[in-house]
Amino acid sequence: MAAIELDGVTKRFGDVTAVSDLDLTVPEGEVFGFLGPNGAGKSTTINMLLDFVRPTAGDVRVLGLDAGGESVAVRRRTGVLPEGYDVYHRLTGRKHIEFAMRSKEVDGDPDAVLERVGIADAADRKAGGYSKGMRQRLVLGMALVGDPDLLILDEPSSGLDPGGAREMRDIVREEAEGGTTVFFSSHVLGQVEAVCDRVGILREGELVAEDSIEGLRDAVEGGETLVITVDAASEDDLDAVRALSGVSNATTDGGTVTVTCDADTKTAVIGALEDAGIAVKDFQTEETSLEDLFLAYTEDDSDVAVEDDEAVEADDAVEADESGEADDPTEGGADTNEDGADDGESEMSVEDTEVPR
């Protein structure tokens, strides 16, 4: 069974189409990276998975359930780390985890969860005094409550130092090894490359690529870069290299020759240089990075796709339209001023407070 199924999904906000005819299937147990420039429709897609907004057209199924008609059941089996979610400043870390457990109606040990995300020593401190990285760890812990079948992580490494980012990746791998599906959206492409089985790239609301990273490399012309150290070479010396089938680009700065080519052409490139009388000292292969692949799929012919202001607004602001969409459960979060005091009531009811789930 697929963990996520989107079939012909379109979402419009007025005259702006945030997501257009999106077909996407994420199998159970997969770590799927969901990428795209700002305004591409990523947040809108995630909000449709969680029934925070309803699609204008198409079907959304999560864990075999209808995302709109069975949203409560979906959320009980889903852990969510939303981008920019704020903690409740007057509540301790332990109380946050207890909130999540009550929300999902599950039993568990809050201290064990806090230990897993690395903030057990701050369990009894009010979260208003946490650093940004500690808050991110806390919300990740809330998402892990109840051993969810699906984890939706939106910019999960935000605020984390390199050590924290590594621990987050380890947790993602552990969850995947246990059978949890992870839907991973991030602008930190190195994190995506390190943990994801496959990636999908969204551009202007449309899915323009979906494959493993190796598959994307194979699909992009010139998947490898050959960096060759030579005694000396001029641009004219590279004519024979440029004439080879499988070579898409070749340049030199005099002492280094850089060639973009197919994997099967590397030996021919070295041979062509030597036949031209160029002494080859050393060479190394650099695979196309996920960042380069991302740019290849999101650039226009000459420029990187520029985000449309209206599309960004539609993607980032969860607007309720005439279709009667569900309210965002994070809207009940405590608004706080800079000194950590709540702007609203001085007492907060556990039962009345919404948490990420």
Image: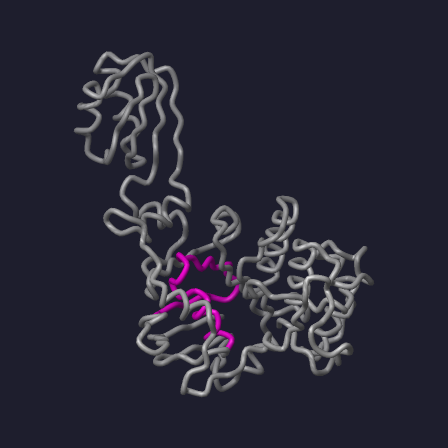
Q: Which residues are magenta?
A: 22-50
Task: Please indicate whether residue 262 sits to the left or right of residue 214 in the image.
Answer: left
Q: Position of residue 339 (x, y in %)?
A: 72, 62
For residue 32: magenta?
yes
Q: Quadrant of residue 20?
A: bottom left
From the viewer's perspective, is residue 286 above or below residue 327?
A: above
Q: Residue at x 75, y 72 (%)?
A: 98
Q: For the C terminus, give its image quadrant.
A: bottom right
Q: Position of residue 130 (x, y in %)?
A: 73, 57
Q: Nearer the viewer, residue 275 or 314?
A: 314
Task: Please indicate whether residue 63 sits to the left or right of residue 117 in the image.
Answer: left
Q: Residue at x 70, y 80 (%)?
A: 105
From the viewer's perspective, is residue 277 above or below residue 221?
A: above
Task: Please indicate whether residue 352 sits to the left or right of residue 261 in the image.
Answer: right
Q: Nearer the viewer, residue 146 or 309?
A: 309
Q: Residue at x 64, y 58 (%)?
A: 136
Q: Nearer the viewer, residue 310 or 273?
A: 310
For residue 83: magenta?
no
Q: Position of residue 269 (x, y in %)?
A: 26, 25
From the viewer's perspective, is residue 282 above or below residue 337?
A: above
